[in-house]
Amino acid sequence: MWPDYRSESHLNAHLYTLMCCADERDRVQKKTFTKWVNKHLIKVRKHITDLYEDLRDGHNLISLLEVLSGVTLLQRSGPLSKRLSVSRAPPLILLGTEEEEEEEGAEGPREKGRMRFHRLQNVQIALDFLKQRQVKLVNIRNDDITDGNPKLTLGLIWTIILHFQVTSPGRYPRQRQQRSEQDVPTGA
């Protein structure tokens, strides 16, 4: 049952303790997930220092998914893709080699600009990639990640960890090597 708080000060003290525990948990998760992301991004010579800030433009998120899946994410080119809103991103083409990319004449996966629209589009490319693989993204939208929402950014990274490491190891080309306990993130 619920504890019997005899005064408002006891209740406030208990709430303060709960909030401190939640903040500590979020801090540990952020540190742990940042290390996990860097462990994979190092393969493409990238590094992040702040999980919330460094995923906002979508570039590192796309790179992470490319490393984990072993495929290149490409946005379909053409006049239609320029007119689509952020919520209706153009379909993705998944290509395995650079030769195939040149044959298809597709654009690179990332919007190069620094405007909010470009960042939203990049994050949407990553989210669409995950949705194509039946990864359930509950209440995670491109603007949540672009705005650096801590809870939803942690949720997205945890979902990626679950999909690529825990529930389907060996399913993707670059993950066929032997798994060890150190592959799954643990506390910092």
Image: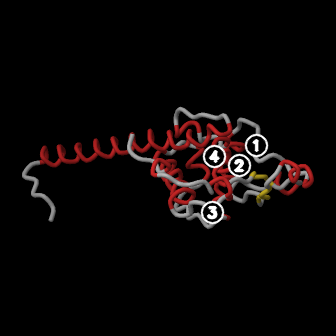
- Cα–Cα gap, marks 4 and 3: 16 Å
What residue do we see at 68% from left, 38% from top? 44
Give the number of the mark in front: 4 or 3: 3
- Cα–Cα gap, marks 3 and 2: 27 Å
Q: Are marks 1 and 2 in contact (CB under 8 Å)?
A: yes
Question: Which of the marked residues, 1 or 3, is nearer the chain's N terminus?
Answer: 1
Q: Are marks 3 and 2 in contact (CB under 8 Å)?
A: no
**Residue nearer the viewer, 21 or 4:** 21
The residue wearing badge 3 is: 171
**Residue nearer the viewer, 23 or 35:** 35
Residue 132 in the image: state x and y as whole percent.
68, 64
The residue wearing badge 1 is: 111
Give the number of the mark in front: 1 or 3: 3
- Cα–Cα gap, marks 1 and 4: 16 Å
The residue wearing badge 2 is: 121
Q: Quadrant of residue 89?
A: bottom right
Question: Which of the marked residues, 4 or 3, is nearer the chain's N terminus?
Answer: 4
Q: In the image, is 157 to the left or to the right of 105?
A: left
Q: Please rate how many residues cluster around mark 4, counting C-alpha atoms within 10 Å: few if below 14, some from 14 to 19, many from 20.
A: many
Residue furthest toward the bottom? 134
Question: Which of the marked residues, 3 or 2, is nearer the chain's N terminus?
Answer: 2
Question: Which of the marked residues, 1 or 2, is nearer the chain's N terminus?
Answer: 1
What residue do we see at 77% from left, 47% from top? 109
Residue 131 in the image: state x and y as whole percent.
64, 63
- Cα–Cα gap, marks 1 and 2: 7 Å
The residue wearing badge 4 is: 64
**Residue nearer the viewer, 149 or 153:** 153
